[in-house]
Amino acid sequence: MKYIKLVFMSLLLSVLVVGLVGCNQGTDEKKETTGKEEDKAGVVNLYTTRHYDTDEELYKKFTEQTGIKVNVISGKDELMQRLKDEGEATEADVFITADAGNLARLKADGLTQAIKSDVLTTNIPEKLRDKENHWFGLTQRARVIVYSKDRVDPSELSTYEALTEDTWKGRVLIRSSENIYNQSLIASFMELNGEEAAKNWAKGIVSNMARTPEGGDTDQIKAIVAGEGDVAISNTYYVGRLLNSADPEEVKVGEQVGVFFPNQDTNGTHINISGATVVKHAKNVDNAVKFIEFLTNVEAQELFAEGNNEYPVNPKAGISETLSSWGDFKEQDINLTILGDNNSRAIQIFNEVGWK
Ligand SMILES: [Fe+2]
């Protein structure tokens, strides 16, 4: 019995080895004859400003399911310029970046293309994608008021507008106006409250600033804990990141602040996305669409969003424990395409009111 088993095993092994060698030869042959057609499923080339381990896991899963290899080039904002410089010669098929304002810039520069996909229009709510389907939200974040648990009672907080009142003089922390998140925030106010009100808001915030804007959202939160100011405007995931940090000092910072969703009795808290677009000069358009579709399925959404402590865009996907602990909130009800439309006027307003 033992012997038979042994013979069977070695037979099986030989078949496997022959099979593998055979496969290899096949691939090699193909390589020689067609040059770059390594595999029928092909590749998708991704430029992304995200860089989380969970993203890598997802790309691997996509390859397992489809055979399509994902080549990743990750970077920061300079990737947008790179795409522009490369023009038609670019290798990029998909571009992933934060903020509808950035995605709108890519579209305005003629670097994106319209995609018709029932999967995407089903999985992603209408307001979280471009009106002409040039880009699609993949994760969602809220721009909230973060406050010192020691010095501020949440009952003192209500709206973004209320932060311009005298009681907040010298207490408000917020990053510079060069930042797209603030440009998109004011672009949303222009849409909801009108240009005059948006400008008055910016003016009021400038006169209540605790300091000249410096650093990113995390630096504003750290400045609350350092006592430089009492409230900050920040994206939710920065608080989530601190709370879930491997560094106990950062966790301590996160625990000393609270998250407040403003404008719950009026027009809602500002939300924005990180999202994807199929590049205008993509060479692998079908794979690019398949890849973005994959990132919107429930399972992928949960991993992708959790990687950066964000909210999924697919309403069927669940949210992380940290996000659930902050509770539900009412969000602004505007199509995010508008953030791009209002961007240049938003920048002008910041300059007019002297927001550094
Ligand atoms: Fe960010």
Image: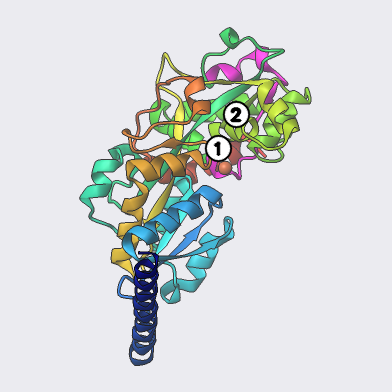
Question: Helix, strand, or loop for circle 1?
Answer: helix
Name the residue: 49% across, 73% down. 86
Dividing the image into 4 quarters, which one contains the N terminus? bottom left
Q: Going from the N terminus, do you reach mark 1 or mark 2 first? A: 1
Find out whether the residues at labels 1 and 2 contact each other: C-beta distance under 8 Å. Answer: yes
Question: Helix, strand, or loop for circle 2?
Answer: strand
Q: Nearer the viewer, mark 1 or mark 2?
A: 2
**Against 345, is 285 above or below?**
below
- The residue lying furthest to the bottom in this view is 33
The quarter of the picture showing ligand 1: top right
Name the residue: 72% across, 25% down. 224
**Against 295, is 3 above or below?**
below
Q: Position of residue 338 (x, y in %)?
A: 38, 41
Residue 354 visible in the current orientation: no
The residue under label 2 is 233
The answer to whether 308 appears left or right of 224 in the picture is: left
* Residue type marked 1: Asn
Name the residue: 34% across, 62% down. 288
The residue under label 1 is 182
Q: Position of residue 114 (x, y in %)?
A: 28, 58
Q: Nearer the viewer, residue 184 or 151?
A: 151
